[in-house]
Image (cartoon, rainbow, N blue to C red):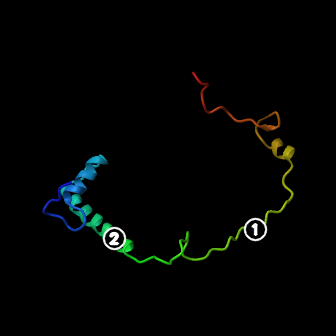
Amino acid sequence: MQKDTESSGRISRDEVAHVARLARLKIDEDELDTYTKQLSAVLDHAAQVAAIDTAGVLPTSHPIPLINVAREDALSSSIDREEVLSMAPGTEAGMFKVPRIMEDSP
């Protein structure tokens, strides 16, 4: 891809316009300038992050150690099945009966 003369950094206006066309986005000239500056800033930041020496740093999924705060699984009593079904507007074969929402297959 050829860079134009109005490049604001890592990505040119032509490249941004090309990506917008590929994504089928209609952007005007002002937006093109704005997105070119913003994408250049994002790419500059990504380059700064990529330049950080991470040798010896263990991979992590979260920067702060997390403790699972879920409670222990414990059996407890629940509402009786027949009691729940007795409150339903309709039942069939021990299950809730609800209106059909989809047509039969053709």
* Residue for point 21% across, 54% down: 1
- Name the residue located 85 percent from the left edge and 60 percent from the top edge: 76
**What is the crowding at mark 2: few (fewer than 14 residues within 10 Å), some, or many (at least 20)?**
few
Residue 53 locus on image (x, y percent): 41, 78
Q: Residues within 10 Å of mark 1 (few under 14, many from 20)?
A: few
Horizontal side of 49 relative to 14 (left or right) equals right
Q: Secondary structure at mark 1?
A: loop
Q: Position of residue 85 (x, y in %)?
A: 81, 42
Q: Which amino acid type is shown beneath numbered disc 2?
A: Ala
In terms of sequence position, does the residue under pointer 1 or pointer 2 come before the other? Answer: 2
Please tell me whether mark 2 sits on a helix, a strand or a loop: helix
Which residue is depicted at the point 25% across and 66% down? 10
Q: Nearer the viewer, residue 102 or 49?
A: 49
11 or 35, which lies in front?
11
Q: CA distance from mark 1 to mark 2?
A: 43 Å
Residue bearing mark 2:
47
Please state which amino acid type lies under the numbered disc 1.
Arg
Mark seen at residue 71: 1
Q: Is residue 13 left or right of residue 85?
A: left
Question: Quick check: 30 left or right of 55?
Answer: left
Compare residues 104 and 23 and report the one nearer the observer.
Answer: 23
